[in-house]
Amino acid sequence: MDAESTRSKSCSDKLALRQVSSLLSCETSRLIAPTENAYLAGLILPEDEISHVGCNRSFGVNGRMRALVGRYWPRETKLKENTPGYQFRPFQVLSVPKEEIAALWPFAKPKFEPCPAITLGQEGDPSTSGAKHKKVRPGNVSAVWILAPSYNYPSAMAMDTGSKSVPTLCRSKTGLCETIINGVKQGNRASSPGARGASSLSRAKLWALFREIAPVSVPRNYQNDVLSSGPLSGASETEVPHVDTVQPQRPDITTYQDFKNPTCLKDPLQIRMQAIGDAKMVLKGWIANAGDESWGLNVLVDPKKRKR
């Protein structure tokens, strides 16, 4: 479960990091203060695929994350119960019987089972012609379905489903339905997706949606909650900085890299980066991917319109 030094992070490393950084993303962490509800409560796995030793080592309080037990972010700050802030919150590993999995997920990835040996007399038998090893490969097609919101909010970033009608699943209305192939919506080229081909879950679309939401949001701070028992590292007792829940728009942010690397102490993303940085020190061997963030929101503009 513990990944070696590589630029490709393992699933266990990513889940372990979420025990500190919460489920909030770069965008939502600027809009929502982190509380217990922002963290995973449990991880559900098939009972026959659970290694208790491996799970305890990867995620437990006595495993590799034990150095983060009792840590809080902002640093040198001890959070009261149910107050916003980042901390190590380990989740439970829960099991599901394989019979229940087979009933609930009939199209789940089949497990590898060695094929029975074929005798010389069965080689020409049509019933055994397909009994050779069946290869299973990951696909490049995925489906996205999101429940419709319970309220109506006029938005310039309308969710384009690409179809005239949307499905209703289990009597639930659809808010977003997309088919993603090679990272872009079906029917678009991966080389130049533009606004039409970019998924609503892409970094560019989420950043654009944040820029639309942030100006109308009322900035507030949780200084009294998060920083009530101590200041940020380097701040004096009499001059405790406050942390805005919503970052105001800044004209100097022109690339996604600028957006992800805040320079203002009031930006709540600073505290999130502190927590992630300390967690990566514990995980070890975590090499940051760089070089894919020097683009702006002009990637959502149609290439033909850009030339005009």
Image (cartoon, helix red, strand yellow):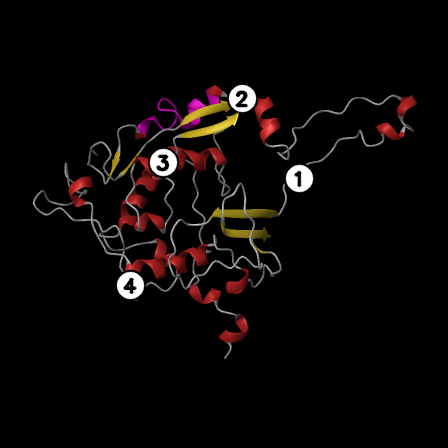
Q: What element carries label 1?
A: loop
User: Residue at left 55%, top 21%?
Assistant: 97
For marks 2 and 3, the one nearer the N-term is 3
Question: Label 3, on which residue?
Answer: 39
- For label 2, the crowd category at 10 Å Cα-Cα, with few meaning under 14, some 14 to 19 and many 20 or more, is few
Q: Is mark 2 on a helix, strand or loop?
A: helix
Kind of residue at badge 4 = Arg
User: Residue at left 66%, top 39%?
Assistant: 137
Residue 137, numbered circle: 1
Q: Which residue lies furthest to the front in this view?
A: 171
Using the rendered view, name the quadrant where residue 189 is placed: bottom right
Label 4, label 1: how many angstroms apart (C-alpha)? 45 Å
For marks 1 and 2, the one nearer the N-term is 2
For marks 4 and 2, the one nearer the N-term is 2
**Of circles 1 and 2, which is in front?**
2
- Above or below — where is 299 with respect to 122? below
For marks 1 and 3, the one nearer the N-term is 3
Label 3, label 4: how many angstroms apart (C-alpha)? 29 Å
